[in-house]
Amino acid sequence: METVIVFEASSPHGNLEAIVEQDERVAYLYVSATENDRLPVKSCWVRNLGHAPEELDRSGMNDGIPPMLPRRNCRDPQGASPLETSQLEIVWFPEGDGVALLEKGEMLAVIPPWGIVGDFPGYARDALGESKLCWGLQDDTLMRKRISEAIDYWEQWDAEESPWAKCQNAFLNEYERVLGPHSRYFGIDGGRWPAKALIQTDLEDGTYLSTLGISLRPQPQIEMYCETPSEFRRFEFAACFAPGTNPETIPRMAAYLSGQSSLPWQRFTFLGNGHTIPCDAFAGDSDLCRFTSVLLVDQPESAPQFSFPTPGGDRISLLWVVPITEAEREIAVSKGSKELIASFPANWPLHVIGLRPAST
């Protein structure tokens, strides 16, 4: 039997690909990662194109043949007409970790964020109950709302004044309101969507690095771990170097922050307060080389305080990078970041790199 690709689309982040395939029996939505081998290919049944079988064809599945959905799970056991490319549309969730297939603007199938990394197969409009091939939606109100919000999100980027155009000046104004005029401005998007930047501000009490634009994308997977994702899914980076820091270390940190700014969407994860990540920006600095990771701290009390815009009503976390040793990272992992911070010397400004000695 011949399988035909009816529709295909890459995610805006470029690391997922959605493909709709059908043969003369059945149609499926597939999502696969282009840059992450640990993510399996996800498949979700869309519709049968002929009479539904009584049972799942397990022997055919073992031979790699996409199975038809059994009769007990079908809204239309007689089957439906083949999919037509001109009537289909793919809508990506803003986080980049979920996708919806629409036909004439109506939802057909959805592989949501909790399906990309887990065992959940996805939802299908024409399915009933739960099966290994898909789940039906008893009440699709919430899913329709998510899809509508996703469409609105992407339409904003096509508007005359894009989110970046609105964000850029707002962030610059807020950073300069608190710190004063910035000294240098760097684009850190590599010419790819979405636009984002980093500024350097040189003051008597230190050199500050601050990002702008990362928060325009909500982070993936937050809703899997948090009941209030709007509090945690957007962030920017900040760093502050004490006067006298090796001048070569500062641009290395700028490059490091630039690279980490895409980490959540590349790895389908998220960054937040108390998280630790490896850092090689201090390797060539004799005063700081003992620090091999950074602890991310959201607006520590010792740091300047900012009031950012709230895209979509979401709060933006400003994650300051705090250098830590390997031993300190082990404490954070095993006992929690609060215990690690409690072990730091008292009265040291937590956010200033170069002023705190290693605690272990």
Image (cartoon, helix red, strand yellow):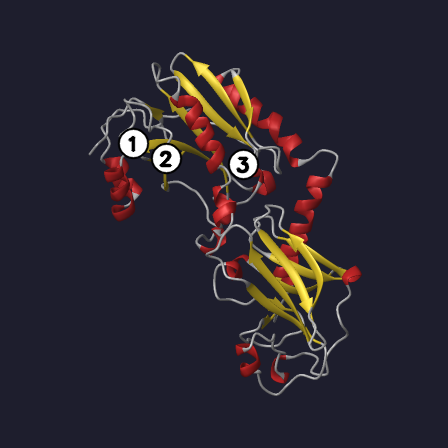
Q: Position of residue 294 (x, y in %)?
A: 35, 35
Mark 3 highlights which residue? 214
Q: Quadrant of the C terminus?
A: top left
Label 3 to label 1, Cα distance in Å? 25 Å
Image coordinates for residue 6, horizontal then vertical, percent: 72, 63
Residue named by callout 2 = 279
The amino acid on which the numbered mark 3 sits, given as a three-letter code, is Ile
Which residue is tagged 1? 291
- Is 66 placed left or right of 83 in the picture? left
Classify 10 Å Cα crowding around label 3: few (below 14), some (14-19), many (20 and above): many
Q: Quadrant of residue 13?
A: top right
Which mark sits nearer the N-terminus, 1 or 2?
Answer: 2
Real-space Cα separation, disc 2 to disc 3, in angstroms = 19 Å
Contact between marks 1 and 2 (CB within 8 A): the answer is yes
For residue 182, say whether it is visible. Answer: no
Write the residue at 28% across / 36% down: 341
Q: Is residue 17 visible?
A: yes
Give x and y (percent) for residue 44.
60, 68
